[in-house]
Every structure is written in C-alpha cells, then in structure tokens.
Image (tube, rainbow, N blue to C red):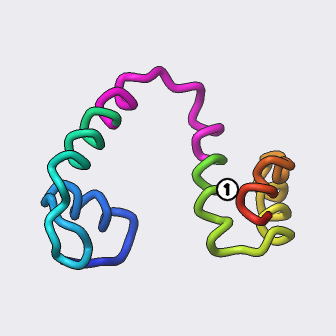
Amino acid sequence: MDLSGPGAIDEAINAGIDLDGSPLPDGMLSLYTEVMGLEGQRKRSGVRKSMRNRVVRTGAKHFDQATLNQRLIDAGWEGLKAKEINFFYG
C-alpha cells in the first residue's frame, strides 16, 4: 500500500488496516463510519471557506506562521485568525 499522498489514509480506512498493516479495531471503524456519514449529510457553507480551512489546517504543517499568513493574503483570503495562530502555532 502506498503510504503517501492525501488518499493514503482513506485507502487504509477502507481496507480496515492502519498504515503499519495492523487491523483497525471494529469500534473505531464503526464510529468513524457513523460520524463521516453524518458529516456527508451536513449542508456546506461554501467552497471558498472550506478551501481556506483545508489550506490553513494543512499549510500549518508545511509553512511557518508568517509565510502561511502572507500566502493566504496573496491568494485573496483573510490572513490567519488569532484562534488559528494559537491552535496551530501556539
């Protein structure tokens, strides 16, 4: 199994195994499936907002605070909010 890229986690979950090859517990899979099913039914507020949330959540792993803040602004979004800075960089 390829362990890289954004699809690696979904592929492992669908196969019922962790990335190290060990089986995922039934209780965890059941709860995950239930919550993701509920999430799939939730109305969305907008693509731009969802895109920004994903960029912040993932970008914080790859960019320092100042760089991510500027990149958000340059792309046309608002810069990092105080709660995001505290959560991801605090």
Picture coordinates of residue 58, whole percent (x, y) = 59, 62
Does 74 sit above or below residue 63?
above
Q: What residue is pinned by disc 1?
A: 56
Question: How would you rate the neighbour count of disc 1 (Cα within 10 Å): few for under 14, some for 14-19, many for 20 or more?
Answer: many
The residue nearer to you, when weighing 51 against 81, is 81
Q: Quadrant of residue 21?
A: bottom left
Q: Which secondary structure, mark 1?
A: helix
Q: Amino acid at mark 1?
A: Val
The magenta-colored residue range is: 36-51
The residue nearer to you, when weighing 90 against 4, is 90
53 left or right, relative to 26: right
For the point 38% across and 71% down, the residue is 5
87 left or right, relative to 28: right
Q: Quadrant of residue 10?
A: bottom left
For the point 79% across and 64% down, the residue is 90
Does 18 sit above or below residue 24?
below
Does 67 sit above or below residue 58?
below
The residue nearer to you, when weighing 25 against 20, is 25
62 left or right, relative to 44: right
Count how many numbered circles sit on residues in the image.
Answer: 1
The residue nearer to you, when weighing 46 against 62, is 62
Please tell me whether residue 87 belongs to the stretch shown in magenta: no
Picture coordinates of residue 63, whole percent (x, y) = 71, 74
Q: What secondary structure predominates along the stretch shown in magenta?
A: helix
Please tell me whether residue 50 belongs to the stretch shown in magenta: yes
Q: Quadrant of the N terminus?
A: bottom left
Picture coordinates of residue 88, whole percent (x, y) = 71, 61
For the point 34% across and 34% down, the residue is 35
Picture coordinates of residue 83, whole percent (x, y) = 80, 47
For the point 81% across and 68% down, the residue is 65
Does 74 sit above or below residue 52?
below
